[in-house]
């Protein structure tokens, strides 16, 4: 009697384990579309990406058109790659996911997102999407996500501080910028923790802009495979220019710090401990300051030492449809509304303050009469924007922070530029080879 | 007593006896089911994935290949794996030695304190202990941050190390280890101190008095009388410390993220990076299994010695 009981228990446990592991392994390979109309679709939106009235406008329009409700869930940025990976791997993933532009390639290449190539013309509607948003969403010529909004990185400066130092107009060349920063530095001599231009050493977006300005890149595609190119002559030149600038105009403590470390760039500028930063939102700086408003700041695209402006490292979001979603037809309808010109103009730009997704809309808004001055830099820079290499393995390089470390070791002088670049290339080649 | 119980069982009818046999099994069922779902099933899955090339793609599409022992071969051919393992053993040793010595010191100190002081010390210890380690890691990062970090400021004020206001702890292998060591030891000491204090209060006073009469100094009394008396407690606490310190992950990940250049990556950080940053899940699983086997071998040597010397576990 006792033996039977024990055998039964073991058998039950074993079958349970097998059944359970079966769930995770035998996931369906193709998405089976449900034929009937769903009650609701699930949408994952990143925190801060769209204002509440924007969300409402899209959802109302969608429900009016289809009669389907929207279950909108707001996600935080921390550990988002792991979260989205887990979500996309379940059999009932969120139907639509809002992703950081540089993260799309990784999810797309591993089969997590629906191929939208055939719908491209319909979605773009004759417009040209911002390159920094479209490029990373395109893997091997196929489109896996649709640009939603952009945020270019430009110089944000404290107008009063610059005026006090005798600067009357925003600089247009790199030499002028340096001369202006020298003036500000002279004005604040003796303030130990003051930075004329605050730029943490591990803030790799800024370093990439210098590299692009010099005509180099951090990785390149050679005969079908991606390779690290930190050791190329032009890239090295850009890194050296960046190091000289960072070491001269930012604080010594900032050399080993990162964007996420406290105090953040926005806090430093907001607290008056710096006269300028390279970042993507004046609103956030004002929020982090003691009573300053957006009009207290000016913006301009970062000039390159080689002349002209540096391509701006564009941040932003793209919408993708989960490959395993059972409601792809409806998800697509929602996506179409969210990326339509009307929503872009009124809510993405209007109430949230981001750059719209196409160059045509950027131009149109810039030419409008009520266009605020402090936005000018962002819009100009958006027309010359660039994003990270769109290799599917790039997310690993961001995830393991080897890119942050590359610039951290260079800024602190732990290693020579050449040695650090060589190490990075070796690591990048290993990652890309997977 | 056992006999009476057996007699009592003999007297109850047969069907009752069977039901009584079932009761423990029924009582264990909820816990057992939870264990099966949350522990055994993932463990079985882990073993399985270590023989495959399971990665991010497999998560989305369910496709993967069985690769036999390839993942294990990859791990064993990787220099970084051995470095991480060696680092883990050395760092665990430093953590256990540090927290045990300081814990023993604080525990002994508490026996000498008056009532009020002792309550205050206990209170403070429990506070440090009760702090979630993610929160304490973030506070630590602020304390040791270059520029505005209070530790850097205090060290500069000492005028011993020169101006170290802008020194970055996480940017140097040794400094990063010192910083994490301080953090882990700080949170490990309370448990050790309180447990050993409790053990010391149970120690036989007559032994100590006898030693005092024979003219032994306080240091000698501690090491030659008290320590042997509380040895069982010390053994247990050391064992637990080894287990906990070997598994330290949060503090390292949050303070240095295994940097600079992976030189503070212990085996936990190394595995995490492989499995959840690279999403090379198969290889991550293989590393875990190899580490477990190594730990089991070491533990078995220890247990064998223990059994040989005739002690209880």
Image (tube, coloured by chain):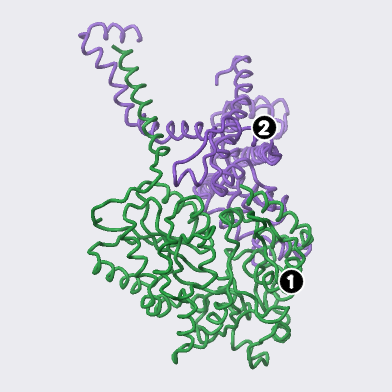
How packed mark 1 is, by other alpha carbons closer than 10 Å (few <14, some 14-19, many 20 or more), is: some
Name the secondary structure under disc 2: helix
- As rendered, which of B66 and A281 lies closer to the eye? B66
- Quadrant containing the C terminus of chain B in the rendered view: top right
Residue A223, which numbered label? none
What's the colour of chain A in the image?
green
Residue beneath the point at 57% across and 35% down = B288
Decide: is B313 above or below B65: above
Decide: is A318 above or below A175: above
Question: Residue A54's spot in the image, x, y percent?
Answer: 35, 73
- As rendered, which of A378 and B30 lies closer to the eye? A378
Residue beneath the point at 48% across and 87% down = A372
Instruction: Say which quarter of the image contains residue A262.
Output: bottom right
Chain displayed in purple: B
Q: Chain of mark 2?
A: B
Residue beneath the point at 41% across and 34% down = A21
Instruction: Say which quarter of the image contains residue B219.
Output: top right
Question: Residue B273's spot in the image, x, y percent?
Answer: 59, 47
Residue beneath the point at 73% across and 28% down = B215
Residue B222, which numbered label? 2
Question: Residue A99's spot in the image, x, y percent?
Answer: 46, 61
Horizontal side of residue A11 vs B254, given as left or right: left
How packed mark 2 is, by other alpha carbons closer than 10 Å (few <14, some 14-19, many 20 or more), is: some
Horizontal side of residue B221 vs B239, given as left or right: right
What is the total number of numbered labels drawn onto the structure image?
2
Alpha-carbon distance for marks 1 and 2? 55 Å
Residue denoted by label 1: A247
Report whether mark 1 lies on the same chain as mark 2: no
Question: Residue A6's spot in the image, x, y percent?
Answer: 34, 17
Name the secondary structure under disc 1: helix
């Amino acid at each position: 009697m006792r033996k039977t009981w024990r055998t039964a228990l073991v058998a039950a446990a074993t079958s349970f384990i097998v059944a359970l592991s079966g769930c995770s392994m035998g996931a369906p390979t193709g998405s089976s579309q449900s034929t009937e109309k769903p009650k609701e679709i699930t949408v994952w939106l990143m925190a801060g990406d769209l204002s509440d009235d924007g969300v409402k406008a899209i959802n109302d329009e969608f429900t009016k058109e289809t009669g389907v409700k929207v279950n909108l869930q707001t996600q935080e940025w921390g550990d988002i790659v792991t979260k989205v990976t887990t979500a996309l791997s379940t059999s009932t993933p969120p139907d639509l996911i809002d992703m950081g532009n540089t993260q799309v390639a990784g999810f797309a290449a591993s089969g997590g997102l629906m191929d939208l190539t055939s719908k491209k013309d319909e979605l773009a509607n004759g417009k040209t999407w911002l390159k920094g948003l479209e490029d990373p969403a395109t893997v091997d010529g196929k489109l896996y996500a649709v640009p939603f909004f952009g945020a270019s990185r430009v110089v944000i400066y404290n107008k009063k501080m610059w005026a006090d130092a005798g600067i009357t107009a925003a600089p247009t060349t790199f030499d002028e910028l340096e001369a202006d920063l020298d003036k500000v530095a002279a004005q604040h001599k003796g303030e130990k923790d003051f930075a004329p231009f605050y730029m943490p050493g591990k803030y790799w977006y800024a370093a990439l802009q210098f590299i692009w300005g010099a005509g180099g890149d951090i990785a390149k595609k050679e005969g079908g495979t991606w390779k690290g190119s930190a050791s190329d002559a032009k890239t090295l030149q850009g890194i050296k220019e960046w190091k000289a600038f960072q070491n001269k105009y930012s604080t010594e403590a900032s050399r080993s710090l990162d964007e996420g470390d406290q105090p953040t760039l926005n806090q430093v500028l907001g607290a008056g401990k710096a006269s300028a930063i390279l970042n993507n939102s004046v609103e956030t700086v004002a929020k982090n300051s003691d009573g300053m408003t957006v009009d207290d700041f000016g913006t301009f695209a970062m000039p390159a030492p080689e002349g002209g402006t540096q391509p701006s490292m564009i941040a932003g979001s793209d919408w993708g449809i989960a490959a395993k979603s059972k409601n792809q037809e409806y998800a697509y309808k929602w996506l179409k509304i969210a990326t339509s010109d009307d929503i872009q103009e009124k809510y993405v730009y209007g109430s949230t303050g981001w750059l719209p997704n196409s160059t045509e809309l950027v131009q149109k808004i810039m030419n409008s009469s009520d266009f605020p001055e402090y936005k000018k830099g962002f819009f100009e820079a958006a027309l010359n924007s660039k994003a990270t290499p769109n290799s599917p393995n790039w997310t690993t390089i961001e995830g393991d922070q080897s890119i942050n470390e590359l610039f951290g070791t260079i800024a602190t002088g732990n290693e020579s530029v050449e040695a650090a670049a060589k190490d990075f290339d070796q690591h990048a080649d290993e990652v890309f080879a997977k | 007593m056992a006999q009476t119980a057996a007699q009592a069982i003999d007297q109850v009818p047969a069907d009752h006896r069977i039901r009584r046999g079932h009761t423990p099994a029924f009582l264990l069922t909820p816990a057992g089911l939870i264990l099966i779902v949350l522990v055994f099933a993932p463990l079985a899955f882990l073993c399985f994935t270590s023989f495959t090339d399971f990665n991010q793609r497999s998560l989305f599409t369910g496709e993967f290949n069985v690769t036999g022992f390839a993942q294990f071969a990859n791990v064993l051919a990787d220099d970084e794996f051995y470095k991480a393992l060696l680092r883990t053993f050395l760092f665990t040793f430093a953590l256990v030695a540090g927290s045990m010595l300081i814990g023993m010191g604080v525990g002994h100190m508490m026996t000498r304190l008056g009532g009020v002081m002792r309550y205050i010390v206990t209170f403070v210890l429990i506070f440090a202990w009760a702090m979630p380690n993610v929160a304490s890691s973030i506070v630590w990062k602020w304390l040791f941050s270059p520029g505005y970090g209070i530790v850097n400021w205090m060290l500069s004020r000492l005028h011993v190390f020169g101006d170290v206001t802008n020194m970055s702890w996480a940017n140097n292998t040794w400094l990063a280890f010192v910083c994490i060591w301080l953090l882990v030891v700080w949170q490990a000491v309370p448990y050790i101190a309180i447990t050993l204090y409790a053990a010391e209060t149970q120690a036989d006073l007559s032994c100590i008095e006898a030693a005092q009469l024979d003219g032994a100094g306080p240091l000698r009394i501690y090491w030659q009388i008290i320590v042997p008396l509380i040895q069982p407690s010390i053994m247990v606490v050391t064992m637990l410390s080894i287990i906990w310190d070997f598994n330290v992950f949060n503090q390292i990940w949050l303070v240095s993220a295994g940097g600079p250049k992976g030189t503070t990556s212990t085996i936990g950080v190394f595995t995490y990076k492989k499995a959840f940053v690279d999403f090379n899940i198969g290889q991550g699983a293989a590393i875990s299994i190899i580490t477990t086997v190594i730990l089991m071998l070491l533990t078995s040597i220890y247990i064998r010695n223990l059994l040989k010397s005739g002690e209880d576990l």
